[in-house]
Amino acid sequence: MTMRSLIVVVLLACADPALAQRTMLVKTPAQYQKALSKAGAGDTIVLANGVWRDVELEFRGNGRAGKPITLTAQTPGRVVFSGRSSLRLSGSHLVVSNLVFRDGYSPRGEVLSFRRAPGDDAVDTRVTGIVIDGFNKPSSEELDYWVGLYGRRNRFDHGHLTGKTNKGPTLAVVRDDGQRNDHRIDHNFFGPRPDLGVNGGETIRVGTSHHADSASHTTVDHNWFEHCDGEAEIVSNKSGANIYRGNVFFESQGALVLRHGDDALVEGNVFLGGGKPRTGGVRVINRGQTVRHNYMEGLAGEGFFSALSIMYGVPNSPAIRYVQVDGAVVERNTIINARSIVFGLGMDKERTAPPINSRLASNLIVNLDGADPVRVNGDAGGIAMDGNLRDPKTPLKRGGNGLIEAADGPDLGAGPLTVVDRASTGVPWYGKDPGPPVRSDRGG
C-alpha cells in the first residue's frame, strides 16, 4: 500500500461515524432520547448544567470493554435531578457519573436502578460520583431503594448518599435467583440516616433471605458510614461468599450483621463508636464466617448492638430464620472500651442451638476502666478460645493511624491497618458535614 492510499484509508476511518467516538451535549429530555438512539461504544452523552425536573431517564445500550457508553454531567455536581425523577440502566459496558438527585423523590421503587425492567438488567456497568441527598418519598412508610444493584459485575463507587428517612435500604443488592453477582461497592460516603423506628432502615443490604443459600460474591470495601442510625443492621448480609473489607463505621448505631448466607469475610474494618449509645460492631450467624483484623473502639451498644456477638441458632433452621453458627473464625481483632461482647446472644425457647466448631483466637480485648465486657449465655463449649488477651493492665499506644495497639508483647489484635480517608470517599465537589476530629495523641 502506498503512503497516499494509507492516508486516504485513515481519513475515511476518521470520517466514518460508526468508527468515531462522539460527545453529544443535550439540553432537554427529547434531545437526550435522540442522542441515546445514536449512541454506540465509546460515545458520551453529556447532560447540560441545570435542574432536570420531573425526568425519568432510561440509559440503555451496549458498549464494549474499554469503550463504554457514558452518561455524565457537563460539570460535576451541576446537573441536578429534582421533583419526581429517576434513572434506570440496562445493557452492558455503561458508565454514569457526576449527577445529583435532590429536592424530590423517585416515583418508582428505586432512585437509581441497574435494571430497566425484570430481565433487562445492566451488566459490566459502573456508576461513579453520584449524589443522592434527602431524596425521600413523601411518607416514611413508603418503601424504596436509593440504589438498586441488579445484574452482574457492576460497580457503584464514590457515591455520596445521605439523609434517607423512608423505609428501604439505602443501597440494595437485589438477586432474583441464586446467580453469582460479582458486584463491587466501594469508596462511598454514606452520611447520616436517622432511626427509622422499624425494620427496613439498613444502609446496605446484600441479597434477601429467599436466595441466602447461594453465593453472591459481592465486595463492599473502603466505604465510610457516618451516623447511619437507621436500624440495628447498618449492613445486612443476606447471601453467601461476600467480602466486607476496609470500611469505617463512625458513630453509627447498629452493626454489620451476617444475617443470612454463609462464608462471609469481614476483614480490616474500623468501628469507632465514640461512646454513643447503640454503636455496635459485628454480629455472627450462619456457617463458615470469618471475622479478622478488625478494630473496634468506644462501642457502647449492648445485646443486638454489641461490639461482637455470636448468636444461638434455631435447630435445623431454614435460611430465613437463624441458622446455627458453625465453623466461625474470629481472630486478630482489637476491641477497646466496648460495653458488650456476647457469646450465645439470642438464646431463647426457639433459638436453642449453640455455636459449634468455632474459634476465637489472638484477639486483643481491653477496657481501660477494668470492666469485663464479655458475657456468655448458655453453652459456649463450641467456641475454642486460643491466645486472647483481656488484661486491662496491658500497655497500649496509639499508632500513627490513630488506632490503639499493644505497646509490646505478643502478636495480638488487628495489627497495622490502613484506614480509609474520609475525604477519599464520596465526591470532592459536594460537601460533607463536619467529620470526626483528627486524633494526634499517642496515649491509650
Image: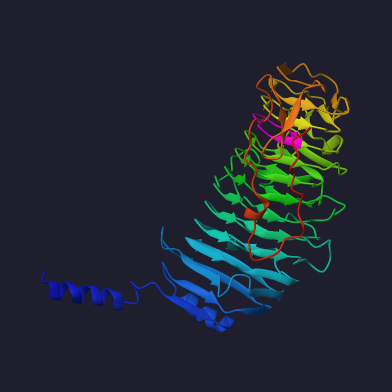
Looking at the rendered structure, the number of numbered marks drawn on it comes to: 0
x, y percent for residue 338: 83, 33
x, y percent for residue 125: 52, 58
x, y percent for residue 313: 78, 29
Front in this rendered view, residue 4 or 64: 4
Quadrant where the C terminus lies?
A: top right
Q: Is residue 89 visible?
A: yes
Quadrant where the N terminus lies?
A: bottom left
Classify residue 117 as left or right of residue 343: left
Q: Which colour scheme is used?
A: rainbow
Residue 358 versus residue 30 in the image, above or below: above
Q: Which quadrant of the structure image shows residue 349?
A: top right
| Residue that protrudes farthest toward the left in the picture | 2
Residue 282 versus residue 228 in the image, above or below: above
x, y percent for residue 229: 81, 50
Classify residue 62 as left or right of residue 381: left
Q: Which quadrant of the structure image shows residue 57?
A: bottom right
Q: Which residue is drawn at 64% across and 52% down?
A: 174
Classify residue 308 as left or right of residue 359: right
Q: In the rendered structure, which segment of residues is drawn in magenta?
A: 283-296
Residue 352 versus residue 442 in the image, above or below: above
Q: Can residue 209 be seen in this view?
A: no
Front in this rendered view, residue 383 or 354: 383
Classify residue 390 as left or right of residue 127: right
Q: Does the magenta stretch include residue 106?
A: no
Q: Which residue is drawn at 71% across and 75% down?
A: 82
Residue 14 versus residue 161 in the image, above or below: below
Q: Which quadrant of the structure image shows residue 75?
A: bottom right
Q: Does the magenta stretch include residue 285?
A: yes
Front in this rendered view, residue 399 or 3: 399
